[in-house]
Amino acid sequence: MSLNRSEKEAVISDVTSLAAKAQTLVMAEYRGITVADMTKLRSEARSKGVTLSVLKNTLARRAVAGSAFEVVGDQMTGPLIYGFSEDAVAAAKVVADFAKTNDKLVIRGGAFGGKALDVNGVKQLANIPSKEVLLAQLLGLMQSPISRTARVLAALAEKRGGGEAAPVADAPAEAQAA
């Protein structure tokens, strides 16, 4: 069933607004995937903030024209599912994780930061830890010198016999709050 002109314009408008907010686009061929597997993929994508769409390639090309994803317009051929995400790695992670368990989903490429990605580029992007994990690692690195200093000071105070010192295993409350 084909779409009339106004329906096509609505699809293009929706995808253009998705592309304007998104940081990443991942394209994958979905030929042969069962409806149950596709439903599972869409559910997983929704929970991670990824919008998956099956679009006519001509409509997809028109929708991304003038955006950072225009660089992959020539790769938009065949039956593709398009994954847009505001998080830089979410779309790549969802599609790559699903492709590991379902060999019928074939990653074709993507775009990030105005640059086209091949299959390996999408997989590398998927291997980057999420924003929350990276922030936790950064906080741990920033907190590490403070907690080490607190442990050294506590050990010195204990060695000099200056009364009860804070436990060596845990940093003082002031160091943890910082």
Image: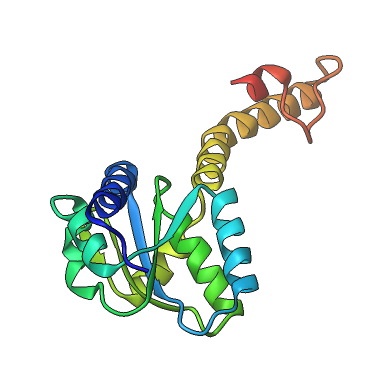
Query: Which residue is at the front of the view, 166 or 173?
Result: 173
Judge whether 2 appears above or below 78 on screen: above
- Measuring from the top left, give residue 3's x and y in whole percent: 31, 60
> Residue 178's quadrant in the figure?
top right
> Residue drawn 60% across and 73% down?
35
Judge whether 178 appears above or below 108 on screen: above
> Residue drawn 45% across and 52% down?
51
> Residue drawn 21% across and 61% down?
115
In the rendered structure, the answer to whether residue 123 lies left or right of residue 117 reads right
- Measuring from the top left, give residue 54's x and y in whole percent: 40, 65
> Residue 176's quadrant in the figure?
top right
Query: Which residue is at the front of the view, 88 or 95?
Result: 95
- Measuring from the top left, give residue 47's x and y in whole percent: 60, 49
In the rendered structure, the answer to whether residue 123 lies left or right of residue 176 reads left
Tell me which colouring the rendered structure shows: rainbow
How many numbered circles are shown?
0
